[in-house]
Amino acid sequence: MLSEFDLISRYFTRPSHNLGSAVALGIGDDCALITPSPGMQLAISSDMLVEGRHFFAGADAGRLGHKCLAVNLSDLAAMGARPLAFTLALSLPSADPAWLAPFSSGLLALADQHHCALIGGDTTKGPLNICITVFGEALPGLTLRRDAALPGDDIWISGTLGDARLALAGYRNEIVLDDATLDKAGERMHRPTPRVELGTALSGIAHAAIDISDGLAGDLGHILSRSGTGASLMVDALPAGPMLSLQPDALRRRFTLSGGDDYELCFTAPADHRDAVLTAAQRANVPVTRVGSIDADAGLRLLDANGAPLALQPASFDHFATP
Ligand code: ADP
Ligand code: MG
């Protein structure tokens, strides 16, 4: 039987691993120690994944390892911050190597890709629950805050939207999908790509940003309410995921607008920064699409391809509003 300390040292501690210049002390003491670069601000965020709520019981451990860090890195991306390190608080029903090995591989592979070291955490027995806190750094004044959108800003979306929601609809049998479509759409749901390079490249260019976890309409709504603005959104300009774009228009509109779990960035930038936005996107190697604009008048106006208003009621995910 694995003890708590065996478990930590076998799966989560890598003695020879380069922790990166910001980490003065990693796993093993009472606290980890981080030294941010001179003049930088720390950006900190936590996200928890709960079995039965955020993922199905029996979900693939390797994908879970990837996803629980990806959603946290996505928050750093949405702030324009560069990842430094993270902690992992883990509640586990049992110390099962068949679960721990793929979980830690999936987790640490993504961590390595972003040079973001695991520096500590907590481990306890209990229902499966994974909580990560990430630490990043950003230049003061150049973070992409939700309250920073200004009337006249363009609204942009990275990558594509809706394939994760399409997969969920398939798993729930809301719609019938063939296996190949479900597999491809499911990749988006299980292995989201945090747009970290884009977020840092946009710092100083974009005004406001948010990562789309609960659906564009709701998440953009957070920018609008924090910034005291409204917006007009060209619904048919929203970039649908490759699997969703094969579906009927009504479904495409609904899932691009309110599908969650894509972890793309929605950001606003002044119209005279369009070239700079495109250059940043090219540097980050991710496509971006201009989908609307920020208005002084409150409210979210949904427009069709001809600029005519659309009568759609976008839903957004809320844990306490949804049974
Ligand atoms: P404490 O008694 O202070 O709670 P622990 O005995 O829980 O410390 O943990 C010992 C060390 O292992 C600490 O440095 C802690 O940060 C680290 N640690 C515990 N659980 C994890 C985990 N799941 N992943 C990474 N590090 C962990
Ligand atoms: Mg502890």
Image (tube, rainbow, N blue to C red):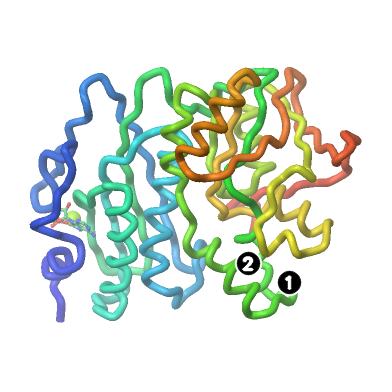
Q: Residue 31, located in which quarter of the rendered image?
A: top left
Residue at image mark 1:
174
Crowding around mark 1 (Cα neighbors within 10 Å: few <14, some 14 to 19, many 20+) is few
Tell me if the residue at label 2 has its CB under 8 Å from ligand 1. Answer: no
Q: Which amino acid does label 1 sit on?
A: Glu
- Looking at the figure, which quarter contains the N terminus? bottom left
Tell me if the residue at label 1 has its CB under 8 Å from ligand 1. Answer: no
* Residue 171 sits above or below residue 289 on the image: below
Query: Residue 54: which disc?
Result: none
Crowding around mark 2 (Cα neighbors within 10 Å: few <14, some 14 to 19, many 20+) is many
> For the residues marked 1 and 2, what is the alpha-carbon distance in whole angstroms?
8 Å
Q: Residue 103, located in which quarter of the rendered image?
A: bottom left
State if disc 2 and disc 1 touch (CB < 8 Å): yes
Query: For this rendering, which residue is in front, 197 or 323?
Result: 197
Q: What residue type is labelled 2?
A: Leu
The structure residue drawn at horizontal position 55% and vertical position 46%, both measured from the top left corner, is 264
Label 2, secondary structure: give it. helix
Residue 253 image offset from top left, x and y in percent: 78, 52
Q: Is residue 247 left or right of residue 142?
A: right
Residue 115 image offset from top left, x and y in percent: 27, 47
Q: Residue 77, located in which quarter of the rendered image?
A: top left
- Looking at the figure, which quarter contains the C terminus? bottom right
Query: For this rendering, which residue is in front, 244 or 136?
Result: 244
Q: Quadrant of ligand 2?
A: bottom left
Residue 189 image offset from top left, x and y in percent: 54, 62
Query: Residue 168: which disc?
Result: 2
Label 1, secondary structure: give it. loop
Residue 173 image offset from top left, x and y in percent: 70, 76
The structure residue drawn at horizontal position 61% and vertical position 25%, both measured from the top left corner, is 274
The structure residue drawn at horizontal position 70% and vertical position 51%, both measured from the top left corner, is 256
